[in-house]
Image (spheres, coloured by chain):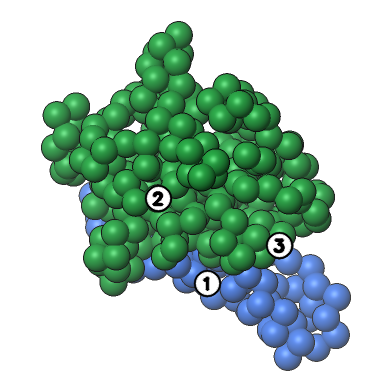
Amino acid sequence: MKSAVIVFPGSNCDRDVAVALARVTGSAPTMVWHGDRAIPKVDLIVLPGGFSYGDYLRSGAMAAHSPVMTEVASRAKQGVPVLGICNGFQILTEAGLLPGALIRNAGLHFICRDVHLKVENTGSMFTRGYKTGQVVRIPIAHADGNYRADPMTLDRLEGEGLVAFRYCSAEGTVGEAHSPNGSARNIAGIFNEKRTVLGLMPHPERMIEPMLGGSDGRPFFEGIAEALAA
Amino acid sequence: MKARVHVTLKQGVLDPQGKAIANALHALGFDSVIGVRQGKFLELDLKDADTASAEKSMRSMCERLLANTVIEDYAFEVWK
């Protein structure tokens, strides 16, 4: 499988996700600079975590208008899978490729720790490596991860099975007390209508082997590799 | 032309920073504070020759970049 990781000024998880893709899928991604207008022919585009443009104006707002984003949007429309992790998720919402917005964490702190997530829908190339309802431990590292959308949009996301992951307790209980950042309905990650675009705040690429503290992120990339090999 | 833009969170959108500021004001003894909403203020210098064209470009800038209309409202004024 061929993939591309877009590198913005201020991206800092681009290499982590490149290592995860190379280790788990067996093929290293092409790194594409945000100023490029062309992206090679690939099966997957990744917008990595970080602090593109220093989070100026709003997290992801400047990156969403980078030259490369026109091509990312056009590929996404053609059905090319696009994955946005953390800042990548913020960029996807700012670019209008996913609904809603990510605002400052409810507690105002930058939170860097492992959280538990419930896998809500395994019917996508990104989540097929997990079981429905499975609880996984994955780290978060963000200040603006508080997912917000109007109630109609939230109902639609839930009704159409477009919520990918929710924050929960270690036992899998979903509730306000287990939302680290105040996200509406504990939402940690969402799909577009066709489930070919996924945005999530947690970092599965930081949990791909025991030496990193756990390997719950590995099935995420294994699922992608399987889906794209088929 | 000059322009000023105010970007504010929509009513109903949680404003954790505004809340923290209100708490700090209470701690300083400003008991009359009922609530605080934090926003952004931007000043722009424009090449536009007249008010109509400046307003048109400002509206487009606000919609496309300066505000995220999913969560924010904007208001602007332009003058010579």
- Splitting the image into 4 quarters, where does residue A153 fall? bottom left
Residue at 24% across, 65% down = A159
Determine crowd level at label 2: few under 14, some 14-19, many 20+ residues with C-alpha closer than 10 A. Answer: some
- Is residue B67 something one can see in this rendering? yes
Q: Residue furthest front?
A: A230
Q: What colour denotes chain A?
A: green
Determine crowd level at label 1: few under 14, some 14-19, many 20+ residues with C-alpha closer than 10 A. Answer: many
Mark sitting on residue A70? 3
Identify the image quadrant of the C terminus of chain B: bottom right
Identify the residue position indicated by label 1 in the image.
B74
The secondary element bearing badge 3 is classed as: helix
Which of A180 and A22 lies nearest the eye of the viewer?
A: A22
Residue at 71% across, 62% down = A70
- Splitting the image into 4 quarters, where does residue A77 fall? bottom right
In the rendered structure, the residue with mark 3 lies on which chain?
A
In the rendered structure, the residue with mark 1 lies on which chain?
B
Which of A3 and A107 lies nearest the eye of the viewer?
A: A3
First-in-chain label (3 vs 2): 3
Mark sitting on residue A124? 2
In the rendered structure, the residue with mark 2 lies on which chain?
A
Q: Is residue A201 left or right of residue A228?
A: left
Q: Nearer the viewer, mark 2 or mark 1?
A: 2
Q: Residue A2: x percent and y percent? A: 66, 40
The secondary element bearing badge 2 is classed as: loop
Kind of residue indicated by mark 1:
Tyr
